[in-house]
Image (cartoon, rainbow, N blue to C red):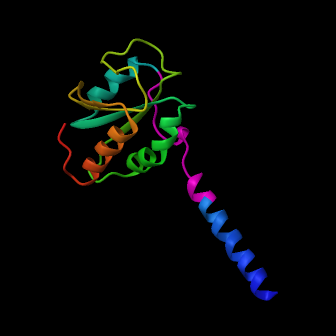
C-alpha cells in the first residue's frame, strides 16, 4: 500500500511540474507590436537583425510551434530581438510585405525584410539555424 501511495505522489508531482513548465509562458509575456506605426520606431532603435513573429491566437499551426518560438524569444544565442504580432489585433498599414499565412517569422535588417517563412517547418528551421549560429538571411 505504501508503494502505491508513493507512486501516486510521484506521478502527481511529475504531472504538476510538467503542467507548470508548459504554462510558464504566454503570448502576453513578450513584447508586441500592436500598431504598424510602432515598426518604424523599432527599426530605428534596433541595430542589426531582429525578428517579427506573426500569429493568430486560435491557429492550430501557431499552437504547434508556440513553445519553440517562446523558447527562441526568451534567449537565443544570437541575442536577436523578437517582436510578436497578433495578426487579428494589429492595426494600421504594414510598411513591409508580411505575407498572408501564419505562423510567420520575418527577419528584418535595417528596416527591410530580408527573410520570411510562414509554416511550422519554416519557423523551426530558422530558429534552429539561428541557435546553431548558421543563419544567413
The image quarter in which residue 9 lies:
bottom right
Residue 31 counted in the magenta span: yes
Q: Residue at point 53% right, 31% down?
A: 59
Left of 115 or right of it: where is 124? right
Residue 75 vertical position relative to residue 62 in the rendered view, above or below = below
- Highlighted magenta segment, given as a residue range: 19-34
Residue placed furthest toward the bottom? 2
Q: Nearer the viewer, residue 132 or 80?
A: 132
The stretch drawn in magenta includes residue 33: yes
Q: Residue at x 38, y 34 (%)?
A: 119
Residue toward you, 3 or 40: 3
**Which quadrant is the N terminus positioned in?**
bottom right
Snapshot quadrant of residue 104: top left
What number of labels is visible? Answer: 0
Q: Position of residue 17 (x, y in %)?
A: 62, 64
Q: Residue furthest right?
A: 1
Residue drawn 42% across the image and 44% down it: 69
- Residue extending farthest top: 93
Residue 27 picture location, percent across and down:
53, 39
Measuring from the top left, give residue 106's x and y in whole percent: 31, 31
Judge left or right: residue 112 versus residue 11.
left
Give coordinates of residue 128: x percent, y percent.
Answer: 30, 50
Between 66 and 52, the one lying in front of the other is 66
On the rendered image, what quadrant is the C terminus found in? Answer: top left
Taking 16 as reference, is 103 above or below it? Answer: above
Amino acid at each position: 500500500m505504501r508503494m502505491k501511495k508513493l507512486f501516486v505522489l510521484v506521478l502527481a508531482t511529475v504531472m504538476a511540474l510538467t503542467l507548470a513548465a508548459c504554462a510558464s509562458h504566454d503570448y502576453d509575456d513578450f513584447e508586441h507590436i500592436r500598431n504598424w506605426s510602432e515598426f518604424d520606431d523599432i527599426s530605428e532603435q534596433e541595430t542589426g537583425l531582429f525578428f517579427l513573429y506573426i500569429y493568430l491566437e486560435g491557429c492550430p499551426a501557431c499552437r504547434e510551434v508556440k513553445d519553440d518560438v517562446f523558447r527562441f524569444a526568451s534567449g537565443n544565442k544570437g541575442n536577436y530581438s523578437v517582436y510578436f504580432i497578433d495578426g487579428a489585433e494589429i492595426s494600421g498599414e504594414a510598411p513591409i510585405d508580411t505575407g498572408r499565412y501564419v505562423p510567420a517569422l520575418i527577419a528584418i535588417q535595417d528596416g527591410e525584410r530580408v527573410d520570411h517563412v510562414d509554416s511550422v517547418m519554416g519557423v523551426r528551421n530558422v530558429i534552429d539555424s539561428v541557435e546553431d549560429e548558421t543563419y544567413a538571411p
